[in-house]
């Protein structure tokens, strides 16, 4: 007879600076579910979900854990390092996992504060690791095989600190992606094999979550690529609609070639507020180098369909892809103007370890420190200092390209209150034309956005009442 040594496990996830997302961490919810099923006690402190949560030391004192776990992202490694510093003197075994641990395990292996470095999706081995956890003289690197997602239990968010305040539900309908985009590391984190879940299981999970989490206002599918097989996502959306779940659903990481008219109609019926497309670049040669496996015509066609059904169109571009330059960025700006998105993301390339673009930069340019570097911009307007350059596209030109892009495409995150901060850069890069194009358009767009939000708020209030309006206020009006 096997004796289970029940443990108390405390997980932490650091907050990403400049990021206001409050969606709880799905991976930690999965690990919590596996451990609780085996009789262990679990507490998840997700500072990204709950920014004002007390210090790690407070939770150690109150929860008295036997094992500590910290999830690591390259963009938040400094914040995660502070957590590890705060807990490392507690004489409790520490395990780390997540994307950064998977990609940069060799660098982490010299950190004598860490006992276990887990690479990959840990559901199959987490209970064994926790069961046998002890201090190691040298960090033990554990590589795990991707699990069969059809046999995984539902995530457990009730283990999260302040879980009753969860308003946005993160749903996984599949894992993995078969594509080979040069800038993407998913094949190292989750494999190229696409592993779908049964649509029925996904629907039951959401219905159960809605019953348990009374503050839920939305659902977001956080797959690596949810539309590898169109019939799968169509089946799921039809079931979602037929069950009258009545929570607006959004799909993250949408490819243009994964959409068709039927999917867009179903998303609209499921109250999806927007559809985002990863365009990456508007210059044909730069776009081709990414190896996305779709065409710019696919993107234009999908954008036209989204507009046809009067859904909000979000676009994502990347500055600094293979062969990019200041002049070539203008192709992306022109394409963005042509497609007329409602919201747009301009990201700076981060050549992560193991990606094809990292190899390209090793041969054709220079890479600076990517640790704690985010490709996203902050809430005012400015990007992080670029972490890579080439002889044809230096750091200063990249910053100029970014500022040109957000002004000429009227990026919603560039707000009027940012003018004092913006002016020195306008002067430095001589972007006077772009500035005076942006200013009146920003004023106009602010007015239009305000009217749109008022109409949307009134509609929700009339249909659902004030309680539902408050629940959905962040999803629609803040983020």
Image (cartoon, rainbow, N blue to C red):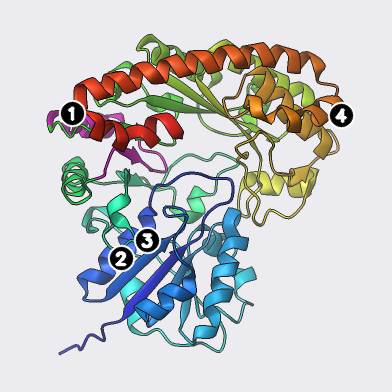
Q: Mark 3 or 4 closer to N-term?
A: 3
Marks 3 and 1 in Cβ contact (< 8 Å): no
Cα distance between the residues tagged 3 and 1: 28 Å
Q: What element carries label 4?
A: helix
| Residue 117 visible somewhere in the drawing | no
User: Residue at image x 41%, y 16%?
Assistant: 452
Q: Which of marks 4 and 2 is nearer the N terminus?
A: 2
Cα–Cα gap, marks 2 and 3 = 6 Å
- Give the left or right position of residue 44, taking residue 322 as reference: left
Q: Which residue is drawn at 50% across and 84% down?
A: 90
Q: Crowding at label 3, few (<14), some or many (≥20) Cα neighbours within 10 Å?
A: many
For label 1, the residue is 241
Magenta extent = 215-242
Q: Is mark 2 on a helix, strand or loop?
A: helix
Q: Which of 157 and 178 is in front in this view?
A: 157
278 sits left or right of 155 in the view: right
Q: Position of residue 240 (x, y in %)?
A: 19, 33
Q: Name the residue under label 3.
A: 28
3 or 1: tag closer to the N-terminus? 3
Numbered disc in front, either 1 or 4 = 4
The numbered mark, 1 or 4, whose residue comes first in the sequence reads 1
Q: Name the residue under label 4.
A: 428
Nearer-N-terminus badge (2/1)? 2
Q: Mark number for residue 32?
A: 2
Spatial separation of the CA atoms under disc 3 and disc 4: 45 Å
Residue 82 horizontal/vertical position (percent): 59, 68
Secondary structure, mark 1, is helix
């Amino acid at each position: 007879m096997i004796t289970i040594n029940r443990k108390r496990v405390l997980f932490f996830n650091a907050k990403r600076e400049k990021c206001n997302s409050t969606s709880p961490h799905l991976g930690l919810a999965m690990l919590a579910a596996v451990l609780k099923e085996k009789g262990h006690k679990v507490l998840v402190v997700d500072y990204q979900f709950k920014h004002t949560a007390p210090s790690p030391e407070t939770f150690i004192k109150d929860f008295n854990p036997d094992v500590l776990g910290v999830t690591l992202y390259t963009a938040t490694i400094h914040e995660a390092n502070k957590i590890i510093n705060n807990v490392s003197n507690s004489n409790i075994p520490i395990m780390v996992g997540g994307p950064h641990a998977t990609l940069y395990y060799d660098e982490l292996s010299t950190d004598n504060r860490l006992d276990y470095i887990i690479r990959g999706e840990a559901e199959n081995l987490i209970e064994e690791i926790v069961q046998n956890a002890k201090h190691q003289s040298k960090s033990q690197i554990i590589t795990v095989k991707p699990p069969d997602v059809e046999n995984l239990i539902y995530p457990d968010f009730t283990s999260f600190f302040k879980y009753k305040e969860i308003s946005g539900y993160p749903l996984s309908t599949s894992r993995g992606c078969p594509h080979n985009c040069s800038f993407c590391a998913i094949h190292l984190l989750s494999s190229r094999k696409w592993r779908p879940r049964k649509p029925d299981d996904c629907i039951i999970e959401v219905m159960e979550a809605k019953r348990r989490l009374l503050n839920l206002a939305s659902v977001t599918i956080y797959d690596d690529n949810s539309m590898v097989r169109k019939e799968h996502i169509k089946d799921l959306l039809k079931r979602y609609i037929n069950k009258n779940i009545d929570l607006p659903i959004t799909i993250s990481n949408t490819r243009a070639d994964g959409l068709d008219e039927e999917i867009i109609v179903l998303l609209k019926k499921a109250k999806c507020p927007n559809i985002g497309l990863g365009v990456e670049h508007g210059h044909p040669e730069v776009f081709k180098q990414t190896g996305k496996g779709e065409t710019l015509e696919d993107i234009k066609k999908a954008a036209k369909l989204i507009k046809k059904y009067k859904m909000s169109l979000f676009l994502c571009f990347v500055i600094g892809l293979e062969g990019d330059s200041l002049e070539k960025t203008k192709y992306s700006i022109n394409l963005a103007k042509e497609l007329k998105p409602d919201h747009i993301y301009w990201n700076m390339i981060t050549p992560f370890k193991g990606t094809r673009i990292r190899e390209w930069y090793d041969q054709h340019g220079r890479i600076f420190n990517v640790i704690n570097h985010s490709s996203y911009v902050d809430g005012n307007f400015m990007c992080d200092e670029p972490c890579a350059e080439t002889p044809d596209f230096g750091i200063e030109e990249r910053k100029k390209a970014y500022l040109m892009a957000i002004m000429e495409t009227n990026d919603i995150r560039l707000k009027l209150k940012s003018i004092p901060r913006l002016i020195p850069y306008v002067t430095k890069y001589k972007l006077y034309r772009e500035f005076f194009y942006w200013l009146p358009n920003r004023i106009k767009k602010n007015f239009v956005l305000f009217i749109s939000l008022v109409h949307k708020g009134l509609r929700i209030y009339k249909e659902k009442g004030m309680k539902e309006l408050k629940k959905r206020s962040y999803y629609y009006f803040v983020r």
